[in-house]
Amino acid sequence: MRTMRMVICLLVCFSGWAFAQEDDAPSRPPRAPAPRLHDTPENINEDVVRWMYRRADKYYHDGDYEGALNCWRLIMILDPHFLEAYEVSWWLLWSLAVSAEQEGKKDEAQRYHARAVEVLERGMLYNPNVYDLYAEAGQYYLSIKQYDKARIYFARAAQFKEAPVTVKRSWAHACERAGDLQACVDVWQLVLKENPTDAVALNNLRRVQAKMNNK
């Protein structure tokens, strides 16, 4: 019952904020139905999450990025294992940070970056047993040229058997950009050990080894 009350409370609060933003609201959120034998807080959560997902998409395409981010944040609260909420949020915050930097708004950009990191850390906290958000964190730090941090997170993601080969490739590139060519070679060799016919790994291994020999 406590979870159900929290969900209804969040929905009521958010819907009041959301519909105040626009004159022509398309539809109201689903109201909590009268309790039935098969109703559970989990079922209600799913309904609210689906509605929030649709609202986030609308806000994004309307250019209301903070509205979209608020929707995604509520989805994180209702379903901490909904990975897309974290993935979309950090990417959007990073994009906003890049735009702010291009406009010379350094303080604003830093705030967006801090929020992106907060989203990723929350995602990893609640989802420590999947590779996805470690890989996302690696991609974020790669995009802001913090290569030592990027390689750490790619390495964590690569420990999961279900992680695609692209994770190890990104790990190798992060090691190279961080200046650790030997670690880069080691990762490419690891990829080739798992798949000896991987042409991408073979070509990159030869390229990095040649770079080391020319030093």
Image: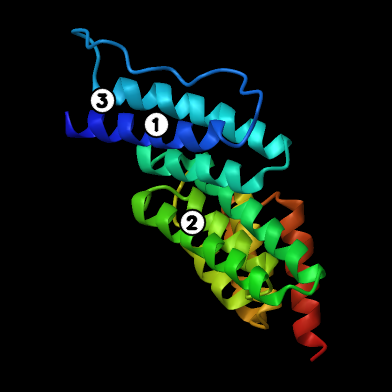
- In contact (CB < 8 Å): disc 3 and disc 1: no
The N terminus, quarter of image: top left
Q: Nearer the viewer, mark 3 or mark 1?
A: 1
- Asked whether 11 or 110 is in front, the reply is 11
Numbered disc in front, either 1 or 2: 1
Front residue of this view, candidates 51 and 27: 27
Callouts 1 and 2 close, C-beta under 8 Å: no
What is the spatial separation of the Cα atoms under label 1 and label 2, in whole angstroms?
21 Å
Where does label 3 land, which residue?
41
Within the image, what quadrant is residue 201 found in? bottom right
Residue behind mark 2: 119
Mark 1 lies on a secondary structure that is: helix
| Residue 115 position in % (x across, y down) | 53, 62
Q: Which mark is residue 122?
A: none
Residue named by callout 1: 11
Badge 2 amino acid: Val
Residue 9: where, in percent of width, then height? 32, 34
Q: Amino acid at mark 3?
A: Pro
Crowdedness near tag 3: few (<14), some (14–19) or many (≥20) residues, C-alpha within 10 Å: some
Name the N-terminal-most of marks 3 and 1.
Answer: 1
The image shows residue 161, relative to residue 146, as above or below, that is above
Callout 1, which amino acid? Answer: Leu
Q: Quadrant of the C terminus?
A: bottom right
Q: Position of residue 92 (x, y in %)?
A: 65, 51
Q: What colour scheme does the image use?
A: rainbow
Q: Alpha-carbon distance for marks 3 and 1?
A: 13 Å
Q: Is residue 127 above or below residue 103?
A: above
CA distance for labels 2 and 3? 25 Å
Identify the residue at horizontal 39%, vertical 31% (top origin).
11
Report x, y in % for residue 90.
58, 54
Secondary element type, mark 2: helix
Q: Residues within 10 Å of mark 1 (few under 14, many from 20)?
A: many
